[in-house]
Image (cartoon, grey):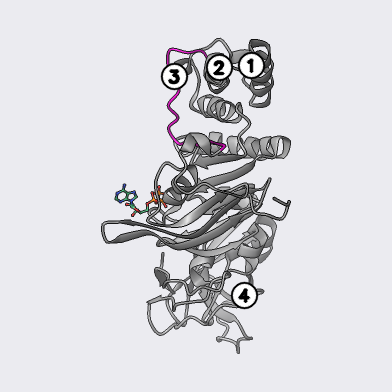
Amino acid sequence: MTDATPMISVQHAHRRFGTFAALDDVSLDIPRGQLTSLLGPSGSGKSTLLRAVAGLDDLDDGTVTIAGRDVTGVSPQKRGIGFVFQHYAAFKHMTVRDNVAFGLSIRRRPKAEIAKKVDDLLEIVGLAGFQHRYPAQLSGGQRQRMALARALAVDPEVLLLDEPFGALDAKVRAELRLWLRRLHQEVHVTTVLVTHDQEEALDISDRIAVLHQGRIQQVGTPEELYDHPASTFVMTFLGHVSTIAGRLVRPHDVVLERLPEGTATPALPELAAVGTVRRVVRLGFEVRVELVDEATGGELVAQLTRGEVDDLHLLEGDRVVARATRVPDLPPVDTRTATRTAPAETTAQGAVADPGPPVAVGVGA
Ligand SMILES: Nc1ncnc2c1ncn2[C@@H]1O[C@H](COP(=O)(O)OP(=O)(O)OP(=O)(O)O)[C@@H](O)[C@H]1O
């Protein structure tokens, strides 16, 4: 196997539950040493795909290769993987130390080797002082870090994480996300993370595979997906979007210019609309300005800095010209209807993707 060989390769994976296709011809290569996220809405097939890689679930059709070895049909224990789920089932009667050592103990590794390895891992996951505690004496975040240490103990070639921080509150999630990124830089094990949280995926991943209705929609770096979404679905799933002059635009790619009171509607440049301020929401450094598009009655959102909003003296009821400074190259949106279904589009992988969900256009979402 060369360095260019993908660490994990899934080819033409199909998985049906009754007549429902949870995976519909999914092919995905995951490079060695990287952190790849499987991102998609609930029910899109992320966990089914991860479970197929882990060997916890069989495919109806297709193959899974890990480190150049076809492991389709091979048991999870023989795949060289470690995994962590949202609700980690720790051994309640064992200390943190014994939980982390478990995989090594059953492999009958020498005691000194186990002790050293566990010490190192507890240090890495920041639980060095907690080794004699029992799982019930840990916080949710600490328990998930213990789970990661336990999964890493046996030197897996691949680490599979299914919403590992899903049950934790937003602040702890954000901390653990940062921590996982740093851990990955240190340990460099090929990692696949299932998440439905676009912010988490954009923040933490080297690459993201976006899934929808059992199919891969696009695969790329966070920048590639954000700057060049392959479809309306990918663009809308990665963050809030509005429509200006029939084009989808992100809130921070909208600039506002105030129209003095009593001004007639001006001739508009390309990619611009006249809007009335409905609400100004201060979110710390950033300010979200919610507008109503005068022509369509639809909602338009601009994200500005506090300074920009103060300079504009924007108040509810003010009229502004909203101009898009940047629009991804997507098919134009039909503004004659309030909602539409995105047409079938070609994904980055060249396959024809299924239609996206109905996309709200010009309605207060
Ligand atoms: N054992 C099963 N029996 C029947 N249907 C299943 C089974 N497992 C999964 N499904 C269905 O397959 C689809 C994909 O499920 P999957 O768990 O992969 O989605 P997901 O993207 O991980 O969603 P979530 O983020 O909600 O966990 C869902 O519609 C789910 O209901």
Q: Secondary structure at mark 2?
A: helix
Q: What is the CA distance from the residue labelled 1 to the residue labelled 2?
A: 7 Å
Label 2–label 3 contact, CB within 8 A: no
Closest to the camera, between mark 2 and mark 3, is 2
Closest to the camera, between mark 2 and mark 4, is 2
Q: What is the CA distance from the residue labelled 3 to the residue labelled 1?
A: 18 Å
The x and y percentages for residue 356 are 42, 70
Label 2: which residue? 105
* Labels 1 and 2: the sequence-earlier one: 2
Label 3: which residue? 91
Q: Secondary structure at mark 4?
A: loop
- Amino acid carrying label 4: it is Val
Q: Which mark is residue 327?
A: 4
283 in the magenta segment: no
Q: Secondary structure at mark 1?
A: helix
- Amino acid carrying label 3: it is Phe
Closest to the camera, between mark 3 and mark 1, is 1
Q: Secondary structure at mark 3?
A: loop
Q: Is mark 1 within 8 Å of ligand 1?
A: no
**In the picture, residue 75 is in which quadrant?**
top left
Q: What is the CA distance from the residue labelled 4 to the residue labelled 1?
A: 55 Å
* Labels 4 and 1: the sequence-earlier one: 1
